[in-house]
Image (tube, grey):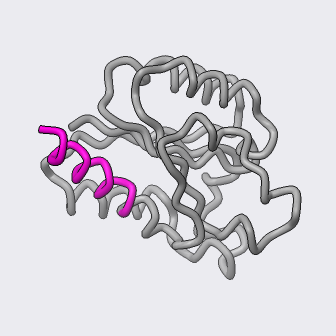
Amino acid sequence: MKITIINGPNLNLLGKREPEIYGSRSFEDYFETLVQKYPELELNYYQSNVEGELVNKLHEVGFEHDAILMNAGAYTHTSVALSDAIAGINTPVLEIHISNIYKRETFRHKSIISKECVGMIAGLGLKGYELGLNYFIDNKKENA
């Protein structure tokens, strides 16, 4: 299976930014752990702080990869463009949030992209990405 993880704005600061919310581990370090744990998967990782670049990446991988895990960061709550991009591709997208968006500021309680995603994992820290990978692995087995 070919799975891409796409992270949005400020997720390049994991390990530095608000460690009490996001932890002290960089995503690059965590990604290497996932690669080692799931050798049967072809895992790819992309991060950008630029909305249009995230749209371009969805278009690029959204017709040839098996699954996408997407943490759109703050764009979750504001980006019609990302929602439209997810709606326009064939690859299923699972929405991921490290923090529980419903325990944060009210404006974070609304996700514009959720309606286009197969589901959402929120509030379980970096473990949410692993749970997302397991969802797609299990789903493929059930549909094989």
The residue sitting at 72% across, 24% down in the picture is 81
Q: Position of residue 133 (x, y in %)?
A: 32, 53
At 51% from the left and 64% from the top, the residue drawn is: 26
In the rendered image of this protein, does residue 111 appear above or below residue 53?
below
Residue drawn at point x = 71 percent, y = 30 percent:
51
Specify the quadrant of the image occupied by residue 91. top left
Q: Is residue 11 left or right of residue 35?
A: right
Q: Residue at x 50, y 49 (%)?
A: 119
| Residue 114 x/y as whole percent | 63, 43
The N terminus sits in image quarter: top left
Q: What residue range appears in magenta?
A: 131-144
Q: Main secondary structure of the magenta part?
A: helix
Give the quarter of the figure containing the C terminus: top left
The foreground one among 58 and 14 is 58
Residue 2 inside the magenta-drawn segment: no
All told, the count of numbered labels is 0
Q: Position of residue 27 (x, y in %)?
A: 49, 59
Relative to 122, 19 lies left or right = right
Is residue 142 positioned above or below 93 on the image? Answer: below
